[in-house]
Image (spheres, coloured by chain):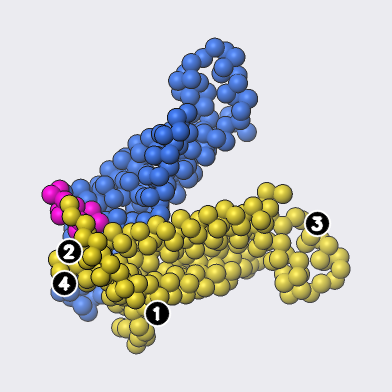
Amino acid sequence: MVWDWKYALDILPGLLEVAPVTILATLGAFAVALILGLGLAFARRSTNRLLSGVTHAVVEFIRSTPPFVQLFFLFFVMPQFGVTMSALMTGILGLGIHYSTFLSEVYRAGIDSVEKGQWEAATALNFTPRQKWMRIILPQAIRPIIPVMGNYLITLFKETPMLLGITVVEMLSQAQIIGSQSFRYTEPVTLVGIFFLVLSYGASLLVKRLEIRLNVHR
Amino acid sequence: MKNLLSGAVPTIQLTLLGAALAFLLSFLGGFGRLSRFTAVRGVSGFIVEFFRGTSLLVQLFWLFYVLPFMGIRLESGMVGLLALGFNYGAYGSEVVRSAILSVPQGQHEAGISLNMTSLQRMRYIILPQAFRTMIPSFGNLLIELLKGTALVSLVTIPEMTFEALAMRTNDAQYTLEIFGWLLVIYFAISYPLTMLMRWTERRFSLGRL
């Protein structure tokens, strides 16, 4: 086992060059998941039995199958129907859809945790459904689930290396490319591991602090 | 479809063996983090955070590309098994730890007052109660592990996803069918597992509030 510091320092800029791709993929997919997840949570709550049933089935299916395969499905199948987008966009969409199913459950738990009296108060004050959701229910539903969302963001971040399967050049893929040029994989792959460890562990500490700040267990 | 199903065998094998390894490691890690000795707590805490913090795919690549340089050659199947087992074992150890901590303090004290040894307390009082709270989380992790097996196709293990990718290079016109069926087969494996877990959960909650 040889660890060459000079080589490690030499390749570091090349690795960090693609760090924005990893970050962009994480944030993009998370944004998709946040928005779509809320939509799914609403569809699941719908009084229309058909809509809520179909949503439930779709959510169960997406949750139970590997995101890696879903990415391939989007990447290879969409062009057959004339929809073409870049690999990175496909990745953002694929991971976003996968995690939206998890976030929809998180939203659901948040909404269910709002006390019944709050709903009744909104009705009693003659709020429109829109006002009720925007001003009473959602602000109270989202506050306690912020740390959970933070944890999903971290999970999502650690899933981004799988985008290399659909030719996105992110950190791990870049490490593989650098490694194949010199046939030295030790340093690049280890550095990528450290990158993920530092960011995800740091983020998890932040989430813990956030949990205390928000005083979730009031 | 037939070729895909033949690829399902290694997928299921990897899932079950990986789950067995992860299950074992989660108890090891969970107990380690609750140990009386600071050194044991520190070391197991570090190992758990390490495997949780670096991504599964990075770990796979590390075992696959870096270990040979250290003179350790593992079969690719072994690489997949180890990475899956350690990664999900680390997540599982948090499940074990929090479940044990969730058993009320009074139960510990009752065990002490009955003059039980710490081993007896763990075996007859704490674990049976903690195990019930662990089941749903372990169930979720099992599904996550099954989904994780798709990633090992990247280190040349011929499981289902690997077969599908190979098939696609030959018959690109059947892409929709290949990946559509692949998703359906994954679902067909994971859904019974979900059902089984729900059944186990009910089974262990019988006669309890």
- Which amino acid, by three-letter code, is at mark 4? Gln
Q: Earlier in the sequence, mark 4 or mark 1?
A: 1
Q: CA distance from mark 2 to mark 1?
A: 31 Å
Magenta segment's dominant SS is: helix
Q: CA distance from mark 4 to mark 2?
A: 8 Å
User: Mark 4 belongs to which subunit?
Assistant: A
The reply to whether label 4 and label 1 mark residues of one chain is yes
The image quadrant that residue B163 belongs to is bottom left
Foreground disc of the pair 1, 3: 1
- Pointer 3: what residue? A117
- Pointer 1: what residue? A89
Query: Does the CB distance between marks 4 and 3 fall below 8 Å?
Result: no
- Residue at the extreme right of the image, as rendered: A125
- Pointer 2: what residue? A184
Q: Colour of chain B?
A: blue
At a point 71% along the width and 62% down the height, the residue shown is A140
- Pointer 4: what residue? A181
Query: Does the CB distance between marks 2 and 1 fall below 8 Å?
Result: no
Q: CA distance from mark 4 to mark 1?
A: 27 Å
- Residue at the extreme top of the image, as rendered: B115
Pick the front one: A54 or A85 = A85
- Which amino acid, by three-letter code, is at mark 2? Arg
Pick the front one: B97 or A207 = A207
Residue B147 appears in the picture as rendered: no
Foreground disc of the pair 4, 1: 4
